[in-house]
Image (spheres, rainbow, N blue to C red):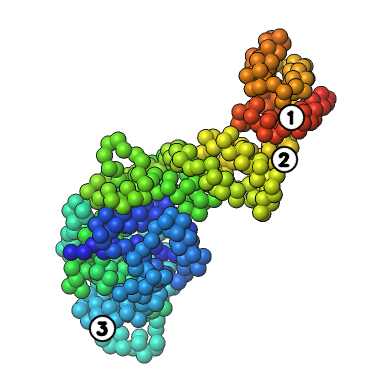
Amino acid sequence: MSIRVRYAPSPTGKQHIGGIRTALFDYFFARANNGTFILRIEDTDRERFHKDALQDIYDSFHWLGITWDEGPDKGGPFGPYLQSMRKDLYQNYALELIEKGAAYYCYCTPERLDSLRNEQQKRKKGETGYDRHCRDLTETERKSLEEKGTAKVIRLKIPLEGEVLFHDELLGDIKTMNKDINPDPVLLKSDGFPTYHLAHVVDDHLMEITHILRAQEWLSSAPLHILMFQAFGWKLPKFYHLPLVLGNDGHKLAKRHGSTSITEFREKGYLPEAIMNYVSLLGWSYDDSRVFFSKEDLEQLFSLEKLNKAPAVFDFKKLEWFNGQYIRKKSGKEIISLVKPYLKKAGFIHEPATEEEEKIIKGMIPLIHERLHVLSDVTELAGFLFHDPVLKDKNEFIPKRLDREKTLQVLEACAALLSDFDSRTDTENEESFRNKALELQVKLGDFLLPLRIALTGSRVSPPLFESIRLLGVEKTKERVKQALSFLSQE
Ligand code: GLU
Ligand code: ZN
């Protein structure tokens, strides 16, 4: 049996990290088994459809380096792969279910359904969902509604008794009483478009999908999908409802936890390698110890047997750590081209960069490379090389153990030391600064802090002496002068 899996996003918003995980698992599973990976766009909910979302899907996967074997842009033997282009086909399958007695027409108006819902909410207890009003319409009643041209939908007839049994490869056997299934979900809407329930069952069958990997939020709908497969008389694919992805508070990962879309991660300066590596470990592991996996590794090593059942916690710190590791693996040259867009966006450099700017960038890379967690850190770490710091708070300059007077004295001393800075070696400079600090009876850290702030505007910066050399002693002196006058203002 050749493996066929699909990632089936609905283009309603930006690609969420949870969806990315599903797609990666699909992709790696297919690659590791010589299978086929299919992209199918589930765009039948016309109200929630967002045209930018489709582009976001393509961009996100292109960026990650993930390709599919069949898809809307690629074609393939089971196309089209855009569900909106398959509209008529679903209608026929809905009619087939009606003929088989497994579905029926419902003529209820939105007003009736609204007031039904309101009543149910008021009652709080008791039945919820559709009341099966049209399930047993007589042929005469139906005819008269048809003659009036009443809008209609097609609903699945969930058996009133009995149970559905299915096997989830990850979660085991799952038994659901039919009476507990949300009554009679809509399969075909009045606009002629199918709902997700109908469309994906039909397509998973027609596209000969062998394994369905999807988010656990679909688990509760799985029984009704099974009922449909059974009603059609189709073979069931294997189901894997993937573990939830939670935030660190134990709730489903959402916006309030931080970035959740690929676009956001990308903009902040996460590398595709890091995202791919980290996301692959959300609910999957190779063994107890190995954490680093390249795309090529995963294309070979990934297996569904190693999926976990337990929810995965999305740890932003851990991802950042991974990202730092992958940034470190890049060459200086690569880092240059990776950080340039951030410098450009901050208005620090021109497009293309001037010769002078290129020189600064080249010089700064060794200083900041190891300190980057995300690429966008570059603007904070190296901003001082492109513009004077903004002096806003005098207290910033004053180390905890010193007061303003002493700080002024320290800065004056630094200014004096800067005069011969260039003629001394780094070791000599270290010694001069250390001696001066000793003489003024302040700790070296306290001695250097005001200078660091004068230079960079920040308490954290790349190594100080190297930063001075990079910016140039003249400019540094100028900044110290400005800081002195700022600090001495009343
Ligand atoms: N369109 C559905 C979604 O975006 C697909 C779910 C599935 O994989 O079956 O969640
Ligand atoms: Zn009805």
Position in image of residue 323 (x %, y %): 46, 41
Looking at the image, residue 14 sits to the left or right of residue 40; the answer is right
Question: In terms of secondary structure, where does tag 3 sit?
Answer: loop
For mark 1, what is the residue? 473
Q: Name which residue lies at 61% across and 37% down.
A: 364
Question: What distance separates the C-alpha of mark 3 from that of mark 1?
Answer: 93 Å
Which mark is first along the chain, 1 or 3?
3
Image coordinates for residue 123, horizontal then vertical, percent: 37, 59
Amino acid beneath label 3 = Thr
Q: Residue 138 carries which label?
A: 3
Residue neighbourhood size for the residue with mark 1, other residues' Cα within 10 Å, grouped as few (<14), some (14–19), many (≥20): some
Whether residue 182 is visible here, answered yes or no, is no
Closer to the camera: disc 3 or disc 1?
A: 1
Amino acid of disc 1:
Val
Q: What residue type is labelled 2?
A: His
**Which residue position is annotated with label 2?**
387
Where disc 2 sits, the SS reads loop
Q: Is residue 163 left or right of residue 266?
A: left
Q: In which quarter of the image is the C terminus?
A: top right
Left/right of residue 244 with respect to residue 324 in the rendered view: left
Looking at this view, is 252 or 466 the one in front?
A: 466
Height in image: 370 above or below 406?
Answer: below
Q: Left or right? Give the position of 398 relative to 341.
A: right
Q: Residues within 10 Å of mark 2 (few under 14, many from 20)?
A: few
Query: Which residue is painted at 60% across and 31% down in the image?
Result: 462
